[in-house]
Image (cartoon, rainbow, N blue to C red):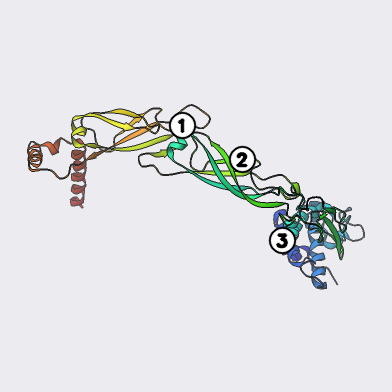
Amino acid sequence: MSKADYYETLGVGRDADAGAVKSAFRKLAMQYHPDRNPGDEDAELKFKEIGEAYDVLSDADKRAAYDRFGHAAFENGAGGGAGAGFGGFSSASFSDVFDDLFGEFMGSRRGQSRGRGADLRYNLELTLEEAFHGKKTEIDVPGKVTCEVCEGTGARPGSSPTVCRTCGGLGKVRATQGFFTIERACPTCHGTGRVISDPCPACDGAGRVQRTRTLSVDVPAGVEEGTRIRVSGEGEAGRNGGPNGDLYIFISIAEHDLFERDGRDLYCRMPVSIVTAALGGEIEAPTVDGGRVKVRVPEGAQSGRRFRLRSKGMSALQTEERGDMFIELAVETPVKLNARQKELLREFAEEGGDNQCAETQSFFDRAKTFWDKVREH
């Protein structure tokens, strides 16, 4: 009975690149692996066939020989030695996916011995003023810490873990599945290499307990929305004496009543009376550091006009420089006028006051041009 075409076995075209070949093999290997099909001889045979196909098609020299001579390239020594080591999985071609496959089969059981503790996240909200000045604060962080009773060993004080007899302390055992040798986490010690016969009563042998710790954090001046601060070693305690994880503090900035922030710069929209805007004058603007600054408003100022105040913005990280602050005018129309005020405004209009507004005149000039074009069509 002739062998199936290797490309058909993996379900790829003859023009498939190395990545496509690997991806196809990995998918099929996961499907037909003996661990997932115990006692299924057809699955084991299929697993061997896709292994043979991948062994050839993942090797550039073997693939070239196969494309030219087919299966004959590996019979009776043909193909210039291209089939050396064939009949199973060659270590060179199969090693690139071995870890991927068994990382999924074995899951978190692998590497449990002396495992690094989990990283923790803490969300910290600051006011804009706190972001400007920086802040030293205390935060409460829940997480797993090393058990103080057993000092992380998991064994009752006065006793100690013993070496696992099943794996000899390696945390791994090997089993043969047909033609393939599989390495697994030890089922007795679950990969730790140790057995705790008398567990610590405080942590039930885990070596870690849940606690809330209070930490002092120094937030530097100038932090922005989304800034991430890493505090090394302040995450959860590691398993079996492994290293601690890290703590990551994510900064968010609360909205401010007066200022809007854009990086180092601040924007403040300030109302001004129609009188000040028309005749000119001074207004007093607040600054983020709690100070005040005077801004000169020229005669005839319009809504939307901006004034730049240099070095009155936010502080910057790791530097003494500051951004700028921009004041944007919002000319306010008076309301609840008394009879005399209304009379004065009418006199102003009669004197042609409405026509003295350059922006108004410009708008209606453009509107007249638009209407003229509409009538022409």
Tell me if I can see residue 141 in this picture: yes
The amino acid beneath tag 3 is Ala
Q: How many marks?
A: 3
10 Å neighbourhood of mark 2: few (<14), some, or many (≥20)? some
| Mark 3 or mark 2, whichever is nearer to me | 2
Give residue 282's quadrant in the image: top left
Instruction: Give the Cα separation between the discs numbered 1 and 3.
Output: 54 Å
Q: From the image, state whether disc 1 or disc 2 is nearer to you.
A: 2
In the foreground, 320 or 7? 320
As drawn, the label of residue 22 is none
Query: What is the distance, in whole Å, between disc 3 and disc 2 at their CAs?
Result: 42 Å
Q: Earlier in the sequence, mark 1 or mark 2?
A: 2
Taking the view exactly as shown, the residue that stands out farthest to the front is 158
Residue corresponding to mark 1: 315
Q: Residue at x 52, y 34 (%)?
A: 220
Please indicate whether residue 150 sits to the left or right of residue 232 in the image: right
Query: Above or below — where is 307 with respect to 7?
Result: above
Q: Which residue is mark 3?
A: 24
Q: Which mark is residue 231?
A: 2
93 or 192: which is nearer to us? 192
Label 3: how many Cα within 10 Å (few below 14, some 14–19, many 20+) = some
| Disc 1 to disc 3: CB gap under 8 Å | no
Q: In the rendering, at what x and y percent does residue 145 appear?
A: 67, 48
Look at the numbered disc 2 and give the secondary structure of its residue: strand
SS assignment at label 3: helix
